[in-house]
Image (tube, rainbow, N blue to C red):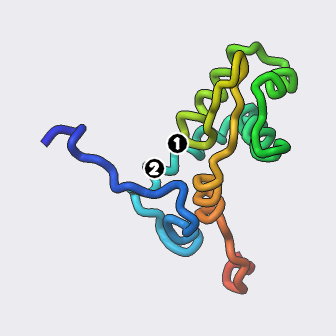
Amino acid sequence: MSKQATALPLIDLNAEAPCCPPLAQRRVPAETAAVLAPAFKALGDPVRLQLMSMIASAEDGEACVCDLTPAFELSGPTISHHLKTLREAGLVDAERRGTWVYYRARPGIMRQLAALLAFDETPAAQSV
């Protein structure tokens, strides 16, 4: 069987319900880790984390690249590279309107990441 025929189990990154219990409760399955790791990796860069924050907190839920680029002392192509990385990781959707591209956060994957990182402050957890 070829490697292409072996697909990872699908995890619905747009689902309302979390894909799995928080990592503080139970080990993350390998398949889930493989699907979510690219998003965490993309957010591991300070510029991409700032871009994600700007997009997610933008009025009307979307941000134009024309508003994102001036916030950094980086070239346009560098910002475009970071936005492409966020898009490829499934964190944002992009829509071209004329000469500008507008970015919108994908709430489903953000909920999945947040649920995975949720940490319940139980008495046992507080003593650690």
The amino acid on which the numbered mark 1 sits, given as a three-letter code, is Pro
Dot 1 falls on a residue whose secondary structure is: helix
Residue drawn 53% across and 71% down?
A: 21
Horizontal side of residue 82 vs 54, given as left or right: left
- Total labels drawn: 2
**Residue 83, placed above or below residue 15:** above
Closer to us: 14 or 2: 14
Residue drawn 54% across and 39% down?
A: 89
Task: Evaluate if marks 1 and 2 touch, with contact meaning CB atoms under 8 Å apart.
Answer: yes
Q: Quadrant of the N terminus?
A: top left
**Residue 14, placed above or below residue 56:** below
Residue drawn 24% across and 38% down?
A: 4
Residue drawn 41% across and 62% down?
A: 29
- Expressed as whole percent of the image width and height from the top left, the position of residue 121 reads 73, 78
Closer to us: 63 or 25: 63
The amino acid on which the numbered mark 2 sits, given as a three-letter code, is Val
**Residue 44, placed above or below residue 83:** below
Closer to us: 22 or 90: 90
| Residue ID for mark 2 | 35
**Residue 125, placed above or below residue 76:** below
Few, some or many C-alpha atoms within 10 Å of disc 1 (few <14, some 14-19, many ≥20)? Answer: some
Quarter of the image for residue 16 reads bottom right
| Residue ID for mark 1 | 38
Q: Which mark is residue 54?
A: none
- Expressed as whole percent of the image width and height from the top left, the position of residue 49 reads 73, 39
Closer to us: 63 or 70: 63
Q: Quadrant of the C terminus?
A: bottom right
Quarter of the image for residue 74 reads top right
- Expressed as whole percent of the image width and height from the top left, the position of residue 27 reads 47, 67
- Expressed as whole percent of the image width and height from the top left, the position of residue 72 reads 84, 23
Dot 2 falls on a residue whose secondary structure is: helix
Q: Can residue 79 be seen? A: no
